[in-house]
Image (cartoon, grey):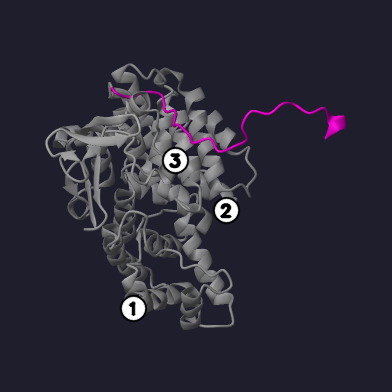
Amino acid sequence: MTDEQNSVTLGTERGSVQFPIHRATEGNDGIVVSSLLKDTGFVTLDPGFMNTAQCESKITYIDGDAGVLRYRGYPIEQLAEHSSFLEVAYLLIHGELPSPAERDSFIERVNRHTLVHEDFRTFMGTFPRTSHPMAVMSSAVSALATFYPESLDPYQDETIELATVLLLAKARTITSYLHRRRAGEPLLYPDYSRGYVDDFLRMTFAVPYEQYDADPVLVDALDKLLILHADHEQNCSASVVRITGSAHANIYASIAAGINALSGPLHGGANESVLKMLQSIEKADYDVNTFIAKVKNKEDGVRLMGFGHRVYKNYDPRAAIVKKRADAVLETLGVNDRLLEIARELEEIALSDDYFVERKLYPNVDFYTGIIYKAMGFDPSMFTPLFALGRMPGWIAQWREMMNDPQSKIGRPRQIYTGASKRDYVDVTAR
């Protein structure tokens, strides 16, 4: 029985209890069950939090059925077309698009802080070159707290703003160093005169003592990829950032936790898994059609990576944008790569095959980003750190919103205990 205006009535063995409805501006309204245990003796059981809203948020809106993604109300299509990554970062973090003066000041401040302490460069060099970049990245972000203790106070607006700028700036430098360390190349210093993405590409791929000019098509493509990854509502890593920060852990520790969550193959590691899938098809003694047949028949543990999404039951709006950039990048670079040919064949078959269409298994953003990153020259192990670089504004925005929410409490989920009931200890001689 539902009161459409105010509450929902739940009938239990203890009688009927009413719970208030919290209205959304768009999307699903929420039933506030905070008093459920006290009023009924029950808790909710929701594996994977499929139906549980952990917070109220004003940052990102997703309609998975309609294929809608908006940052602070702005459609992702418009932001990708007209905005830049740092402007979108400002929007996510501060809630509004910046004025020209605010934008220029923010960009200048971020670029000015991209230089890292020399001891931090030494620290980055202590990890084995074979370390997975995500493990190094999470350690590096945690270490920022020790190099910049003046930015740790979570209760001072100026301190939080400093930490925000430092994270956006240092993350770019850290990500370029991950690539160069893995390749055995010297670490380069930032060039403040260049743009955020332009200088990132220079720091990542330039040869010392030689002029490096990034192709504008590549700069634009990477800038758009970072925008598309900037936030995605209450996903696994954002939830981890929030629950870590709910203990009032500093922002660096909270985001390092998010990076570790993102490293999982079911989350940020999906684009790396796409390339591994393409490589397995290339090495196999069968073609793409045979691979598709194996996917349908669930043979040999074969899995189709880069298609479908936990939230989107329609075409991922980010994927349509990335596909255009992928075509432009491949054309600009003149790439002739068998893995990319396999990807295109796979995409064509999956988009026209009834099996995938009926199941709404459309290519998602991970399918195309891996293709672009590989064409640019990134090793597959770098795909997830690039995802993390793009997601940095979203994590920062989520942490800041959580800290400013008067309803925020330390995260402490309940459980349904299904283990043994009380039993007495048995001496080892009697077991």
Is 350 located above or below residue 206 in the figure? below
Measure the alpha-carbon separation of dots 3 and 1. 45 Å
Residue contact between numbered discs 1 and 2, judged by CB atoms under 8 Å = no
Left or right, residue 127 beside residue 322: right
Residue at 55% over, 74% down: 299
Q: Depth-wise, is mark 3 or mark 1 nearer the camera?
A: 1
Q: Secondary structure at mark 3?
A: helix
**Which residue bears the numbered disc 2?**
183
Residue at 50% over, 70% down: 278
Taking depth in this image into account, of 186 and 159 the one nearest to the observer is: 159
Residue contact between numbered discs 3 and 1, judged by CB atoms under 8 Å = no
| Prevalent SS, magenta region | loop
Instruction: Provide the residue span drawn in magenta.
Output: 407-431
| Dot 1 or dot 2, earlier in sequence | 2
Q: Is residue 118 magenta?
A: no
Taking depth in this image into account, of 282 and 337 the one nearest to the observer is: 282
- Residue 173 numbered mark, or none: 3
Dot 1: few (<14), some (14–19), or many (≥20) neighbours within 10 Å? few
